[in-house]
């Protein structure tokens, strides 16, 4: 369905500003430190690895890596909810902690289910960083309000991205810099935000960060932070027709 065509006459960009919440897995430095003997060798290895990564996207050169990285890497094989694999990546986040954690839990289950060789004990233990950042743009849209809210089922389809990827391309072409939309994974119906352009971020670094532990098993995901406590997500919360929906290929 062409949601943009159905809504275009009523579309008026609006100013959006606030704080976003994003969770990322901690990966590289812990893994690479084990490969070398001292800090000098580690620094050299990190420099070599960074030179092999995709070039920085224009406008992200002065950003902290947590803010720049989502814009740096090409989309996955299936793209993302609002972006095809042939377009620059979007920066996705929650408007608060609940959708950010729910989205993380869903994708941890997808990752575990997609492993060709399961972990010996059937579980993955990982560390993550939750952070906040400020955003502001005069060219925003609220997909959770009229006229787009009439197409909520399309915009939150848990299995299919074709229609939302088309909408994403059309918003990008119309000069929209960012938008707010309902999470398809948060059982409480929380809202997410997506940025097409790094210029919609305010400031070069996260406002706040916290450390989390994640335990992923076949039946669910548990996230823990010493201040926030435990947040548990059962696999059944994400099932569609009795199965875990994988992002479309």
Image: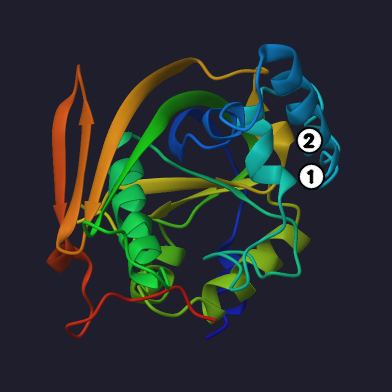
Q: Nearer the viewer, residue 80 or 37?
A: 37
Mark 1, other Cα within 10 Å: few <14 / some 14–19 / many ≥20: few
Q: Residues within 10 Å of mark 2 (few under 14, many from 20)?
A: few
Q: Which residue corresponds to the image point at 20% horizontal and 85% vertical from the top-left?
A: 241
Horizontal relation, residue 124 to residue 180: left or right: left
**SS type, badge 2:** helix
Q: Is the residue under label 1 in contact with that under label 2 (CB below 8 Å)?
A: yes
Q: Residue at x 61, y 18 (%)?
A: 205
In this rendered view, identify the residue nearer to me: 53 or 14.
53
Q: From the viewer's perspective, is 162 left or right of 60? A: left
> Residue 233: image x %, image y %?
16, 52
Residue for badge 2: 50
Residue 182: x %, y % from top left = 36, 55
**Residue at (63%, 75%) from the top-left corner?**
166
Q: Residue at x 39, y 75 (%)?
A: 246
Asked whether residue 80 appears in the rendered view, the answer is yes
Q: Quadrant of residue 97?
A: top left
Place of residue 66 in the rendered image (x, y in percent of width and height, measured from the top left): 59, 30
**Mark number, residue 151:** none
- Residue 135 falls in image quadrant: top right
Element assignment for label 1: loop
Q: Which residue is mark 1?
A: 53
Q: Is residue 196 above or below residue 162?
A: above
Tally of numbered discs: 2
Nearest the viewer among 121 and 174 is: 121
Colour mapping: rainbow
């Amino acid at each position: 369905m062409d949601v943009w065509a159905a809504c275009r006459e009523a579309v008026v960009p609006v100013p959006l500003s606030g704080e976003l919440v994003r969770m990322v897995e901690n990966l590289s430095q812990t893994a690479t430190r084990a490969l070398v003997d001292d800090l000098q060798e580690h620094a050299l290895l990190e420099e070599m690895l960074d030179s092999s990564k995709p070039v920085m996207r224009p406008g992200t050169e002065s950003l902290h890596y947590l803010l720049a990285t989502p814009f740096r890497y090409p989309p996955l094989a299936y793209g993302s909810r609002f972006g095809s694999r042939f377009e620059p990546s979007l920066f996705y986040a929650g408007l608060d902690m609940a959708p950010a954690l729910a989205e993380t839990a869903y994708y941890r289950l997808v990752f575990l289910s997609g492993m060709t060789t399961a972990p010996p004990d059937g579980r993955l233990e990982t560390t993550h960083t939750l952070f906040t950042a400020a955003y502001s743009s005069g060219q925003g849209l609220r997909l959770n309000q009229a006229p787009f809210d009439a197409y909520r089922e399309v915009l939150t389809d848990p299995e299919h991205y074709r229609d939302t990827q088309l909408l994403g391309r059309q918003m990008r072409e119309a000069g929209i810099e960012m938008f707010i939309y309902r999470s398809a994974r948060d059982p409480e119906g929380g809202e997410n935000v997506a940025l097409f352009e790094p210029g919609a971020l305010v400031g070069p670094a996260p406002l706040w960060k916290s450390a989390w532990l994640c335990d992923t098993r076949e039946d669910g995901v548990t996230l823990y932070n010493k201040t926030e406590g435990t947040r548990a997500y059962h696999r059944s919360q994400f099932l569609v027709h009795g199965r875990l929906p994988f992002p479309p290929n």
